[in-house]
Amino acid sequence: MTLSPSRTLAAVVAGVLALTGCTGAHPGTPSAGCRTLAADPGWYGDNRNRIDGMIRQLGTCGKAGSVTSGAPLALFDWDNTMVRNDIGNATFFWMVRNSKVRQPANRDWTTTSGYLTPPAAAALAAACGELADPGQPLPTGANTGCADELVSVYTNRETRSGATAFGNFNHRRMQPSDAWGAQLLAGWSDAEVTGFAAAARQENLDAPEKAEQTVGTSHQVGWVRYYAQMRDLVATLQANGFDVRVVSASAEPIVRLWAADVGIAADRVMGVRTEHDGDVLTARLAMCGGEPSIPYNEGKRCRVNEQVFGAPGAAAFQQLPQERRQAFGAGDSDGDVTFISDATALRLVLNRNQIELMCRAYSNSDGRWLVNPTFIEPLPMSPPYPCATQGFDVPDGGQGPLLLPDGSVVADQPDRVY
């Protein structure tokens, strides 16, 4: 990996001033003794210096950060951004192995997701059929047929026979398989789900890197690691008065458990929410912007705008004015494109070869994008990204050209940071 030349501190600060439109000294400019990012070879080029420059300009040393009192907001995706691998997957696999998925009402799998196709519902009914009464846990720890069908629908988004599992959704606002992972928690209390997540977390942290686990008859990823660099980044932002929050397409009780270990409080975590029936969770997705929603792509913007900035109704799906947006955003996937693009100062992308996200980051039309290899198991160089033809995920699931705000087409981009 070839590192680009580092900037001087003066150049970093000057660059942030230009990017944010700020001039002169910030009233809360921290002293020289305030926390900065630790030196670490995992940071590519001048990324660390540029983030430190942003923190110096926008932060306030030692002040507790809250958007309500004017603190700058920093938003992080969770899976493969704060940690390597996916905590929603880890918990789902644990639940299947330990027989914690419940038989749906009337054995009708469409009650678990409004996006589940008839072939998928039929395949699940055939595989899991009479194994348990409605509302009771299915014996997926022992019955590999039921386990394998669940895993196929969840991970491959198709049945074992190859039928499409989910349909009739806006691909920029919904990822039904992620939603389904939260919807299959139905029938359990928040405390019980937290217990499942804690058990899965311990297993995956204890497992060696690159470990696999057997779920049904399939082999799945069996380990998760926190990124030390991202843990340090969160703590540094908090020490400098930023309001740090997580916005994730994993179930909220699961993300809250994992986020607590990096000092992010439960009320600063935005994950997939389902409604409650008394003390137990249901399969009904919470609403945002007037529709069933999860924090995925434009759904992440909706959740942030509604919950953090108080945008009402459908307006939560629209980009807010600059003064009512996050200063910093970090993510790794096309499901993070919208909320990262909304960041007004810097945007950190961990390169996992996601076409739309990498097209936006490499085109870098306003100079605010930072690209970094993943801190554990960085991916090799990708072929050039087809931005001019496939750089934008359209709502119906197709792909089209990625356009700049002036309507011009983004040229195909070579992979430069890996």
Image (tube, rainbow, N blue to C red):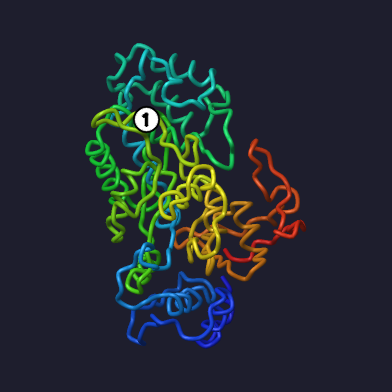
> Residue 131 occupies which quadrant of the picture?
top left
Expressed as whole percent of the image width and height from the top left, the position of residue 105 reads 35, 17
Residue topped by disc 1: 184
Quadrant of image for the N terminus: bottom right
Q: How many marks?
A: 1
The answer to whether 53 is drawn above or below residue 255 in the figure is below
Q: If the image is split into quadrants, where does the C terminus sit?
A: bottom right
Mark 1: amino acid: Leu
Q: Is residue 84 above or below residue 23?
A: above
Q: From what the image shows, is residue 41 above or below residue 378? A: below
**Which residue is located at x 48 percent, y 46 percent?**
312
Residue 398 at x, y percent in the picture:
68, 39
Along the viewing direction, whichever of 171 and 211 lies nearer the viewer: 171
Q: Is residue 164 left or right of residue 377?
A: right
Q: Mark 1: few, some, or many residues within 10 Å (few <14, many ≥20)?
A: many
The reply, left or right, for residue 208 in relation to residue 21 is left
Residue found at the far front of this picture: 312
Is 154 rendered above or below residue 380?
A: above
Who is closer to the viewer here, 41 or 130?
A: 130
In the image, 311 versus 162, the foreground residue is 311
Q: Left of 366 or right of it: where is 91?
A: left
Q: Name the residue at 38% across, 39% down.
A: 273
Residue 349 point in image, percent of width and height: 53, 61
Disc 1 secondary structure class: loop
Q: Position of residue 99 (x, y in %)?
A: 29, 27
